[in-house]
Amino acid sequence: MHIGFIIDDWNNINPVRNTTLRLVHEAFLRDYFVGILYPNNLTIRNNVVHGFFKVLEKMDKIPSNTETFFKKASFKEQMLPLKGFDAIFVRKDPPIDSTMLNFLDSVANDVLILNDINGMRKANNKTYTTVFNDPQNTFLPITFVSKNKEYLKRVISESKHEKMILKPLKGYGGKGVIVLEKNAIHNINSLLDFYIDGPDEKNYVIVQEYIEGAEHGDTRVLLLNGQVLGALKRVPAEDDVRSNMHAGGSAQKHLLTPEEKAICKKIGPQLVQDGLYFVGIDIINGKLLEVNVLSPGALVAINRLYKTKLQKKVIDFIEEKVNEKEDAIKQRIAYREAVKNA
């Protein structure tokens, strides 16, 4: 099988905890043709989308240890047509690159792309949770998104909660997440100015109810094809509100609660419908905070905690989807021949 991974920069990978590296390694162990592509290396040659791929070169013996594999990996650069790949796995950190998606549009009918292009367009920021109907806020926290500073100030002042969360709409990895205390209302003006006023245009920000128990951490669940793949508890550092491991949080084993299982069951079908097959969700005290569809992590930590290799299941799933696609093509050709020979 031929598989391409769209990532930010191979040289910036942290081999100890990087999920993408485990997926690349697993694909290479299966003797796949593996190419790494940076978004800015997409190009068009005679109306056909190509990419300047870094192609993993064959090894006499592939190390079973992923970190050793990372050290020994070597590449040759080749300009290749994307339609020559069976699957393209988008593993680029947010924010989404709209130009990259425009390039991928032209090959979406021929190549399996994870996650689906239109699904990524729809779900690449924190407004995606609004597609899950929850008017009573049984599993979605009360959330406001706006660029209007006066509106947000009114929302904060009228809130019944003593604390609220403020974060940028396009943030990821816990960057920019702070707790607003109502008794510090005099600071809100300057905070909103800082978050909203960008150099070129105003930025959307999120104001969200503070979920009780957030100080004790959140649950990260990885979903594959709408089903739970694995989960863990992320506990923030003593001096931080954020549980993200990028921000210094630590990982612990976690058995999903009935409420957490219900959330996964509720949103799973919608994720599959939108072609969002490999997804990470964050839950605090029975409330769904975020859906991460671009490059969800925590796979390495789950592997370590439970002595498993979840990347095998992810690559198995890709093989199944590619085979389904190939079988459909063969079947269509057979039907055409039957009609032709009638």
Image (cartoon, rainbow, N blue to C red):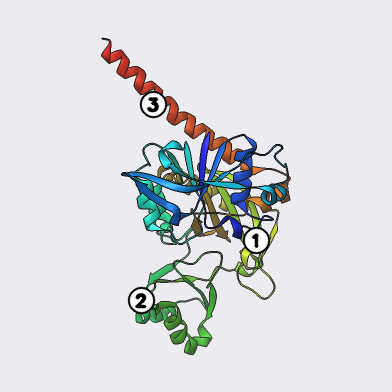
Q: Residue visible at 63% across and 41% down?
A: 26
Q: Is residue 290 left or right of residue 47?
A: right
The image quadrant of residue 23 is top right
- Check disc 1: other Cα within 10 Å, few if <14, some if 14-19, many if 20+: many
Q: Which residue is mark 2?
A: 200
Above or below, comparing residue 161 to residue 115 in the picture: below
Above or below, comparing residue 337 to residue 317 in the picture: above
State the residue in front, 339 or 43. 43
Mark 1 lies on a secondary structure that is: strand
Q: Which residue is mark 3?
A: 329
Mark 3 lies on a secondary structure that is: helix
Q: Is residue 257 left or right of residue 330?
A: right
Please state which of the two labelled residues, at mark 2 or mark 1, is closer to the viewer.
2
Q: Amino acid at mark 2?
A: Asp
Q: Amino acid at mark 3?
A: Ile
Q: Amino acid at mark 1?
A: Arg
Q: Which residue is mark 1?
A: 234
State the residue in front, 131 or 110. 110
